[in-house]
Amino acid sequence: MKDKTLIFGNGPCAHYIAEDLLSTGEDIVIATTDKTCDFSPSEHSESIEILTDTRLVSCRGSVGDFRILAARNNKEIKRTVAGVIVAEEDQRKSNFSLYGLKASSCVITLSQAKELLLDSSHKQSIFLKAKKVVFLTGLVKESHPAIAEEIMHSALRLQSDFNLQTYILTANLKVAADGLEALCRETKEAGAVYIKFTDTRPEIHSKSNDSVQIEFVDEITLKKFRLTPDITVVDETIVPSDYAVDLAKLLSINTDPDGFVQADNVHRFTVFTNRKGIMVAGPSRSIQTYSDQITDAANAALVSAGRMAGLQIVPEDRAEIDKGLCIRCLTCYRLCPYRAIMLNTRVVVEPHACERCGICAAQCPRGAIHIKDLEPESISNEMATGERLQEEDTFMPFLVAFCCSRSAIQSGELSLRMGHKLPPGLKVIEVPCSGSISFDHIYGAFERNADGVMVLTCHEGNCHSEQGNIYAKQTVAQIMDMFLQIGFEKERLAVQTLASNMGTEFAEMVNRFEANIIELGPSRLKKNQ
Amino acid sequence: MGNKNVLIIGGGTAGLSAAVELVNLDIHVDLVEKSDFLGGHAIGYTCKATRNTCVKCGACMVEEKLKDTILHPKIKIWTGSRVQEVSKNGRFTAKIHCKPKYIDPHKCTNCRICFDKCPVDGAILHGFSKNNIPFYAINEELCLYLKDKSCGLCRDECPETAINLDPKATEYIKEADAVLVAAGFHPFNPEDKPYGYHRFQNVITSLDLERMLKQVGRVKRPSDATIPERIAFIQCVGSRDSKLNHLWCSKVCCGSALRMARLLKERQPDIDISFFYIDVQTFGKDFEQFYKDVQEEVRMIRAIPGDIYETDRQKLKINFLDNNTHETLEEIFDLVVLSIGITPGKDNGEIAELLHLKLADSGFFKSGAEEASAPNTGIFSAGTISGAMSIPETIASAGKAARQIVKYFRANDS
């Protein structure tokens, strides 16, 4: 198998990744929807293929063996690659409507202003005749340092090269990027005026001749001002390109609440997605400055070049589907966060893509999926070691806590290290993800004489398997319903969230739970009752 | 690359992240950390999740990097150690100075007896993570035995005889093929600001609050352990300050402070929180929603207070110019949290000299375009040594440095 990396994109980040991977002898394919590709490798040209005017149609397979189907002029292009990097661009949406303005010769977007300033001849520039330029940013929606940086650079040019007066009207001035605070001071020294609004906003009027009039009360001096700029520059909202969003759908990678092509999950730092072997770098995953893109490119190259090392050994402890029991209901296929379930002649698990979260096994209605050491029986056996009989008169409840290996297990150990006292009858059971917990696990614990069962899982949005904690909550809720119907105390079951660094909170949770169970007394399901 | 070795200076977020990346590529690592504990400042940070939902501060990822580091056989960990000399003759040769190992990590069971028995507050330090091994360390500055041999309680009481108060410092010579500087930042010391830090007990820093929340999960007044009714957060302490010539935004303080403020409101809803700021910086995804929500829970005041005075019962009086009334107001708070900025590491000068590098005027290491001018020195940098960064940014910069190192090795082998 040839270890080839497919890069989607034709911007600086895509080119950086290409250059970087070529420099260490990797084979790459660049695919762009653009008619031409500006990338020209300085060397190693035999290792690169460039596909222009090409759109992805489908991607099958998994890490090490992605089978790509793309289209160019209605012609099919097929490639097999080991890894994929989405390094598409962002796009700008004008914010005219937020300020009640319309585009005109004197109301322009920040991108237009930047373009006008890039033109070195600037003989035709509208800035030549202008005296006052107003920048509007972050007054309706919060701005971003990437936008602020462009405004500051533009204002600096206008002040120094065009000798005109700039005003920057903003709410919160975004300076949280390298060098911005210093740049801001430079623009002020060059004469730019910053007017900040907190509780009020300027009134922006669009006149019939397209000119703009801005009235406001300065919040510090309380004086009224009227600005009649010759040119008004309106900020923009940065969103991922449409094609990047399409790619996310085609590649089954999760997006964030702002629409960017990477789930907002700490486990995806820096360039990872929910799919092994597919990465996302550059401005389609978040709003980025130029140096962010360079950093992303290096990270994508780092992971790509190191990918093969992880594929040498086929892991043996991954999910396996019993073909005799499987009825092809595709529950596993729908729920697998890593897209590790393959629909071939039968449904199979691709071991390299499987992360052993156990969601499929817990959710399979036929019980057809098995993961070594995660079976309810083997976990029940583990429980036996913590099982204790009633000691004399005092009731010491036997508590089982199913703990996610990434969060609760860690916080439990930290809790002990910090010197917290934990319930003496607490048995902690490690599971790779709380999504692996099924009815059988929980009921099995009560059958094994547990007086109370806790499921301790990650906070929402922090699950490595994206939704495993949500499935765990649903499972627990269903069982609680059932308990309610059969008249068994549902308080004997609890689900709570933790992070790996919450030692104090772990102790609080289990101790509070123990107190509740002591109040309830021994479970009626106990065999020795 | 099984025969390559990288010397990493600094065992915080950047050093740990880079170490994990490098060993994944079969490169050996010597990780040298001057303090007794790995994890840097961030290992003391609290989880700031509210409403059972992660707010993506990244603190738990530092925990994960630390776990991966201590489990990896190819990472040699040097805590309580400093790199003292570095010479280059093809490879790098470094002298590593290790301060005495008072607690034997193989014998210590972290039973905490030493910590509980020690008569001097702070003379036995503890870590913040279960992966800080051992979890305890002797503070050379405060230990009575090291001062005048007047105490030896910890050694005598240790059931495992893990404590030896008379060991010698040691020195080792290590060879490396590349050096990665990841020595981190210095949290701004606000003692010189007119806020009374270290003079007034109830003025604490954001770092103090992070640790307090991580340790006990609730905020209390240091003076009397009561729950404060009114808390003031003051932003930009040591950042965006032309008098100090700190012409940078520390990037992380708005996110850290506002996330902690919301956490406090969730856990201790009776506390009133006021937030003094210049500009609220954008952080995380879905910031628009976060900012809307936080304004409902926290009183936002766009002003930076001038002075803080202590009043009766160790309350704190703050003067500030009110935006709405345009008058100077005086308000009393029970606790003040100073959001201290990211400033250049105290050792930056020394490390730069050791490696024959020049610092930027700000005191940080040079980064970005400037750093790329010398790609062939075999010396690389990662993390906040070159300026303010969040945890995700630090992890990304460590990945970038790891890739640069790999490319350096490739280029110099062919």
Image (cartoon, rainbow, N blue to C red):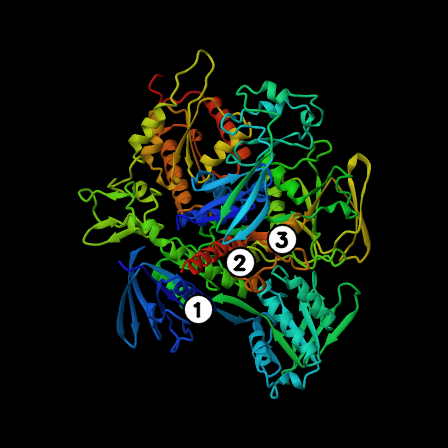
User: Do the residues marked 2 and 3 share a common chain?
Assistant: yes
Q: Secondary structure at mark 1?
A: helix
For the residue pair A508 and B182, the one nearer the viewer reads as B182
> What is the CA distance from the residue labelled 2 to the residue labelled 3?
13 Å
Q: Quadrant of residue A378?
A: top left
Give percent across and percent down for residue B336: 72, 43
Total numbered labels placed on residues in the image: 3
Amino acid on which disc 1 is placed: His
Amino acid on which disc 2 is placed: Thr
Residue appearing at x 48%, y 51% in the figure: B177
Amino acid on which disc 3 is placed: Ala
Give the labeled residue for mark 2. Answer: B377
> What is the CA distance from the residue labelled 1 to the residue labelled 2?
25 Å
For the residue pair B377 and A293, the one nearer the viewer reads as B377
Give percent across and percent down for residue B233: 69, 47
Residue appearing at x 34%, y 27% in the figure: A382
| Mark 3 neighbour density, 10 Å: few (under 14) some (14–19) many (20 or more) | some
For the residue pair B265 and A383, the one nearer the viewer reads as A383
In contact (CB < 8 Å): disc 3 and disc 1: no
Q: Where residue B352 is drawn, which disc sits there? A: 3
